[in-house]
Image: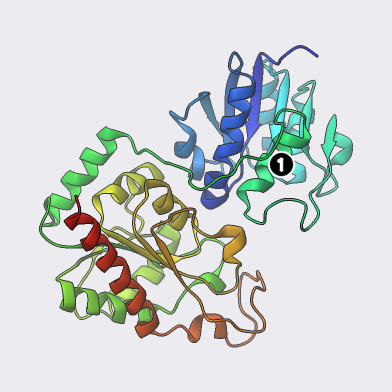
Amino acid sequence: MADPEKILLRVPNWVGDAVLCLPAVEKLWEKFPAAHIVVLARPGVADLYRGRPGVHRVLEFDYRGRHRGWAGWVRLAAELRGEGFDLAVLFQNAFQAALIAFLAQVPRRVGYARDARGPLLTDPIPVPRPGEIPPHETYYYLELVRRAGWLDSLPAVERIPLAPLPAAVERMRERLREHGVGPGGRLRVVLAPGATYGSAKCWLPERYAALADRLVEAHNAAVLLCGTSAEATLGEAIAVRMRSRPISLVGATTLEEFLALLPLADLFIGNDSGAMHLAAGVGLPQVVIFGPTEEAGTGPLNPRARLVKHSVSCSPCFLRHCPVDHRCMTRVSVEDVWQAVEAALGERRQAASER
């Protein structure tokens, strides 16, 4: 079979999943270096793929606008049909992804056979059974590439490096200056208390506030409160409980800008979330609070990450919202997280002294 000349990649919808899919995208590029690779992504993750090695173009799936609903899917399929793709690789798992590729008349359509979409694929790939591949989710995407015949074996993935655009970093540096946080000086801590997946992943707002106050009192930290516009209520719930007002960037950064902020910070504190994976990608020291999810599957690929978790019998449950008492998170105290923060900062100081 001749190598494809133009490849469509439908990537995952959520930021964390989109980060974990990057090694698989890079392996496809290595397999087909002469191919024109186009990524189809939701607006919330599109920036992550712009400028990546091997990605020639990024198309946005405007699922809330012109590509909304069945009529929008048909419109998107018509747009893709005009592109002349000869291969579609569907890393996104939904029926919708296969239907759009089918309606776009892409001759070869490869994806996992799940969500009743097998008949729409030319190459329906069996979903890995538990224990067949390493548990971390990044191997789930790599295994699709391997089972399609484009990869001999699964590589070991220890990190997924992310490099913000230099111009974006300079813009964020200037924004910090406007907030009175210049180069050097105060400790800069990114606090990312949200999780798009659901409230079950989130530590308590009042405890984030208490932790932030402790950072200010003990280290004169500049607390950079971050999140999406959908997390504005959560951000305000933390800010109003703090004795010292944080620098709130909630709803005020794009994905590109948030990624550019991370190299300017000294520490990241948050939950299992897309923001966590972005911070891991830039190699920022991290303290991450886990509850209803499994760190072996979605933990940060970052040797500088410290995880805080209390084992409870019902975890991991993977539920979006806890139907009981949220014990996996309520049992994590401010002191538990503070000890991890102090350890991370001590390690950072030691590394700086050895330079």
Q: Nearer the viewer, residue 312 or 51?
A: 312
Asked if one can make out residue 326 in the rendered structure from this viewpoint, the answer is: no
Question: Which residue, as the protein is rendered here, is positioned at the far front?
Answer: 354
The residue tagged with tag 1: helix, strand or loop?
Answer: helix
Left or right for 130, reference 254: right
Asked if one can make out residue 221 in the rendered structure from this viewpoint, the answer is: yes
* Residue 331 place in picture, x, y as percent: 49, 87
* Residue 179 place in picture, x, y as percent: 14, 56
Residue at position x 59%, y 24% from top? 30
Question: Which residue, as the protein is rendered here, is positioned at the far right?
Answer: 119
Q: Is residue 184 above or below residue 189?
A: above
Q: Nearer the viewer, residue 350 or 88?
A: 350
The amino acid sitting under disc 1 is Glu
Q: Is residue 307 above or below residue 332?
A: above
* Residue 260 place in picture, x, y as percent: 31, 44
Q: Is residue 62 above or below residue 271?
A: above
* Residue 284 place in picture, x, y as percent: 34, 54
Residue at position x 65%, y 17% from top? 6
- Mark 1 is surrounded, within 10 Å at the Cα level, by few (under 14), some (14 to 19) or many (20 or more) other residues, namely many
Residue at position x 64%, y 31% from top? 9
Residue on which disc 1 sits: 143
Query: Which quadrant, please, contains the N terminus?
Result: top right
Left or right for 77, reference 129: left
Residue at position x 63%, y 19% from top? 32
